[in-house]
Image (tube, grey):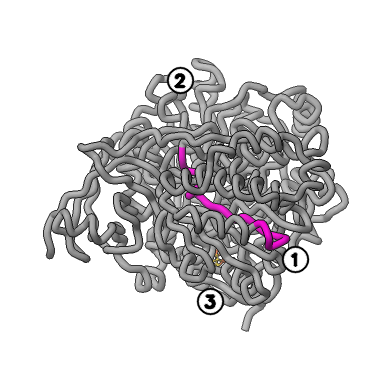
Amino acid sequence: MSELKTVVCPYCGFGCRLLVDPRTMRVKPYKGEPNRGKLCPKGLHATEFVLSGDRLKRPLRREGVRIRPISWGQAIDEIANRLLEIRELYGPDAVAFIASSKVSNEENYLLQKIARLFGTNNIDNCARLCHEASVHALKMVVGAGTQTNPYEDLERFGVILIWGYNPAETHPVVMDYISRAKKNGAKIIVVDVRETTSMAFADYGLVIKPGTDIALANAMMHVIIREELYDDEFIRTRTTGFSEIRMAVRKYTPEYAEKVTGIPGETIRKVAREFALAGSGAIMWGMGLTQHVSGVENVLAVIDLALLLGYIGERGGLYPMRGQNNVQGAAYMGALSEFLPGYVPLTDERFRKRVAKIWGVEDLPTERGLYLTELWEAIENGDVRALYIVGENPAVSEANFARVREALRKLDLLVVQDIFMTRTARYAHYILPASAFCEKDGSYMNSERRIQWSHKVCEPLGDSKPDWEILTMLGRALGLPGFDYASLEEITAEYFRLFPELEDRSVEELKTGEGIFLPRKRLHTWEFSTPDGKARLIAVERISPWEKPDSEYPFILTTVRLISHYNTGEMTLRSPSLVRFMGEPKVFMNTMDARKLGIDDGDWVEIETRRGRVRMRVKLGKVPPGVVAVPFHFKANRLTSEALNKAGTPEFKFSACRVRKLGNN
Ligand code: SF4
């Protein structure tokens, strides 16, 4: 048997490591942290899509309706010249870059470096679509926008509150930690808008009406304050804003919240007491909280709830569970339009100039760039003329994708760098073939902020190249300073220089050890990352969804994830083992609602919103009356609303829709 290579799983943000046999490409679970010998089906079959016959193997250029192969040299020169021409004509902000949550830290670091040296902060990644609301809320309250504790801490807390998040299907291996916590005596509380698979495992499963999370969190705080269950000393010594919270939650009695959320008042009381009296606890959340127009406020409410009890540091943790395998790394490396690496604001002159100096220039642009979700309007208006996309598929992943597809058609230049001819790549002027995850080295950061090295297993397919090599060529062709890297490790060492916590760490250590936590394993143990070291409790009120059901569109449409599918399906649909395992995506409907419309289990229906319609079979049950839950993958974004919250995330979780029976077949 050849030597097994340790590789980071290319799917979810939990960050399992895989052991891959270079000869057979078979996968075994890594025994160490964080997955401890476990993998879900996606991880076990993670190398299958790499061998797909659909892989892009040569650079391609659009010539009218045809797409023809060209050489790497020609492709990079032509792209660089077009970008420089567009900058000359319209300024640097006429160009935008989309980074990837699936490529390495080094590659995201390079793309944001290109964007900023080119003169624009128009650099963003799909963190905008998922947890950017968590980043904004966490920065406001505790001063750092990330998960606070490692997964291992989950096992020793007295209670785990899982809110708008279905770990059993989105991060299956974290369920192992949650099970151990339960065996150790922890109570598990799950809040969701439907009966999820994770709820089956909970001590309390609360099915809440969509868009009413703030009412529930405020009512729980109401009980905790009224019954004096909060941690008085922690609040006095480590927080500000308690009196505002006390005032704000006064009217959120459990009886009031019952009317809003649908959860009986007595259950709210019981759960609030259980949560408060556990003595230590974690709150884990997902896109059920963030993908609302109230996304930032929803997250603020659950952070307040944890902090009232001092559930932070040694006694608790905040776990915004990240979706894609390197979404945390992409954001940390600065592939965000409002932050430099390390989530440092663009206005922090000292840090900005330090980064500029390392990059060999005097200063960097200071104006916030466009959010990924603001790009489409900017393209429609002619403000953005060129778009360079690495490993993202906005023609499927963005809300109201029909509008996005129209915008992509309008661009003077669209470059897509990917491993497959995605739906987005079909609109591109240039398509650059990238190597897959196991054909290159690189570092990745998982949801708990652990940087892990992923080792190269096999050679790149055809004429494809690792993204970092392509971006290095582009940086040089654009005439930017600091792109004369002799190896990938030089890029790793360069990003290490930006973080004081990594100054004494080596790339070698990263390659051989159990990973490095950035900035450290556990945050806020003694003080918060705010200017005065205290957390700011911020009271929030309910915010209505942007689009409400009415007589024309009477149902609430929400989106959900399924275990065997992943995002836009480009990888999972090319994995034969997963395709065998996955069922047909179905829309979940309440049985009583369906009966009224004469719909039976398995019938074909048409779901329609003000933006479009899709056809699917129905699966009855698991959702409350008035709610229709569509799997997020593939077609759902023909329907979803692009109303944005304060962090620029669309309201994927709430639209008004109607359902029409199409009949059996
Ligand atoms: Fe990969 Fe996530 Fe499954 Fe682990 S839980 S194997 S990281 S998809």
On-image quarter of the C terminus? bottom left
Task: Name the outermost residue toward the right.
Answer: 504
Marks 1 and 3, Cα distance to the nearest angstrom?
22 Å
On the image, the x and y values in percent for residue 633 come to: 38, 54
Q: Secondary structure at mark 2?
A: loop
On-image quarter of the N terminus? bottom right
Given residues 125 and 543, the one toward you in this image is 543
For the point 57% across and 35% down, the residue is: 540
Determine if the magenta segment contains residue 286.
yes
For the point 38% across and 50% down, the residue is: 559
Find out if the beta carbon at label 3 lies less than 8 Å from the nearest ligand 1 atom: no
Marks 1 and 2, Cα distance to the nearest angstrom?
45 Å
Q: Magenta segment range?
A: 276-292
**Quick check: 561 left or right of 33?**
left
Residue type, mark 2 in image: Asp
Determine if the magenta segment contains residue 55.
no
Q: Which mark is residue 26?
A: 3
Where 559 sits versus 122, above or below?
Answer: below
Given residues 350 and 162, the one toward you in this image is 162
For the point 38% across and 62% down, the residue is: 573
Query: Quick check: marks 1 and 2 in contact, CB under 8 Å?
Result: no
Of badges 1 and 3, the one in the foreground is 1
- State ligand 1's quadrant: bottom right
Label 1 crowd (10 A; few <14 / some 14-19 / many >=20): some
Please give the residue where the numbered disc 2 appears in the rendered image. Answer: 383
Res. 74 visible in picture: no
Residue type, mark 1 in image: Glu
